[in-house]
Amino acid sequence: MEKAVIYVAGCPDAYPVEFYNAETGAYEGVIPQLLRRFSQQSDYEVRYYAPGRRDQRQHLARNRQVDMVTCLDGETFPNRRGEAVAAVTAEVDGAPAAYRLCLLDVAPKGLEQALRSFMEQVSEEIRAGELIAAVQTGPPPRQHRLEMTAAALAVTAGLLAGTAAVLALRFRRRLRRLETAGETDQETGLGNRALLARLARQRLSDKNRMLYVMFCFRFDQQRLRGPEDGERTALLQHIASVLQSFSSDADIAARVSDNGFAVLRLCAGREEWELWIAALMERLRECGTCPMAAGVCPLKAEDRELDGAIYRGMQAAGAALERGEAYLLYSDRAAASFQEEKRLQGDVRRGLSSGEFRMEIQFYVDADSGRIVGGEALSRWEHPERGSIPPERFLPMAEREELTDQLDGHNLEEACAFLENIRQHGVEDFFLCCRLSRSAIASPDLAQRCGQVVERYSFRRERLILGLTEGSVARAPQEADRNIRALRELGLKVVLAGAGERFAALFSLGDHLFDGITLGRELLERAESAAGPAVVGGVIRMGHELGVSVLAEDVERVEQVRLLRSLSCDVMRGDQLYHAVPPWEARKKLLEQLKQGRQV
């Protein structure tokens, strides 16, 4: 969940409680450190607004440009709401003075309670330790107000001058332990956002900022295979290990979200980082557990905070993941494309409810005779503004919107309606394959939902074939076995789609009761290599030895047709044979073939 960003106006010269350090370009001291802890432990992310030497608190409060203001007892600010939250007490000119956080009327309603609860839990030891740690580091150069010394500091509980050195050592050690724990991702041992932010503040400046590149890495944890918890932890640790091995001492690697990592790297130019990211992604993808992609975001001059760069990098990584690319470079044009994809995703639900999704049919032909024997039901989205959108583009959107069950039901209904229609016109022996989404196989009510649709029609049940992808079966083997058996009890047939793309899928044939396998584009493209015919022929022979049919899809060249015929493939489809057509045109072609005496 994204954190709510809270802006605070600070006092630039209340050293060591709160002060602006021109060398780091940021606020430092006790209150900033406490607010960083609050950001780590709450649903809010606190940022100082427009840090600088000039005290802008009155101006920012008057214009409601911030949510809260740091104030000393006795100071008043416009647009204030409620009672100020106590932060720390110190001695100013020999008298105790309380520093508080004054909330304005534009602050979120839950902020005051969350901030107050946090401050009440911070012990006096922690506050005292922060004060001493700030003094030990000394004031920044040219500090011009409230030059406090260690002897002038005291917490309300009191620190005796004779024990200050011992306490300082104890507090520094304890604070370091707390800081280390707060900057480490416990699941991977890698740094987290807090570490990334702190080290970036130390290393980046206006002179070198634009030489850095933010690399963001994202994986699709919904597509993890195997036991979820164990597989997920193994994947996270693998990614962390690879990132560490590819990072130098000058790089900053961190886990920045539940399914995302980042590396901030000083790069000599595009050629250098392209070689680096290509090698890194190749290593990451060797894991093969689930898809991963990266987003590349060169820092801009205004990127004083890294949140914007991380957000842009994650946007690019998400787009690369959807497109099946290793990485994408963020740019203004790419950002416009990302926004277009987001708007399009929002249209999926409307498109389903308003009938914009329709079915097209691409024929399967008998490999020997060339006779049409079946077809593949292909879903198309006819967007009213953007035209025809193919499934490889809208299916990931439907998954993110959790609409795959609805889309599967729509496609199944159209496929059944077509089979019923051609049956009424005398076409009995035509099969139609309808591919299910990758999440369908794990649904406990899959067979029940399919049965409710099929029972409304009278076509022969074996004429409807449901296609399941290898990845979906591998992720949920027990659920797959149960559902496949239940579907076949309904009289339907089930094929394993994409067999041979990953040869581990072929072992699924012996574990489940499939009626057929499909050979996909990737395997056929490799078929024209020196070893290709032997590999494809081996897959076809294995399918026949197991007693299942072999269907080749995405056949696009004459050479592939000849090869598949020579290897005794059963049926095949692709643009080289027939293009996908709407149902009315498919019916017309089938009736023409029937009239010619070539029984379908």
Image: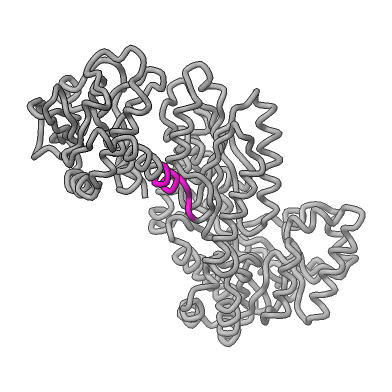
Is residue 356 rendered magenta in the image?
A: no
Residue 261 drawn at (x, y percent): 53, 45
Q: Quadrant of residue 16?
A: top left
Foreground residue, 158 or 247? 158
Which residue sits at x=55%, y=40%? Answer: 253
| Residue 218 visible, this orientation | yes
**From what the image shows, is residue 104 above or below residue 14?**
below
Residue 414 drawn at (x, y percent): 51, 67
Report the magenta residues as a range: 176-186
Residue 527 drawn at (x, y percent): 84, 57
The C terminus lies in quadrant: bottom right
Is 181 situated left or right of 425 in this image?
Answer: left
Is 38 situated left or right of 284 in this image?
Answer: left
Residue 61 drawn at (x, y percent): 16, 26
Main structural element of the magenta stretch: helix, strand or loop?
A: helix
Is 186 situated left or right of 552 in this image?
Answer: left
Is 244 situated left or right of 445 in this image?
Answer: right
Q: Residue furthest front?
A: 162
**From what the image shows, is residue 221 above or below residue 460?**
above
Which residue sits at x=53%, y=29%? Answer: 331
| Residue 552 visible, this orientation | no
Which residue sits at x=87%, y=65%? Answer: 565
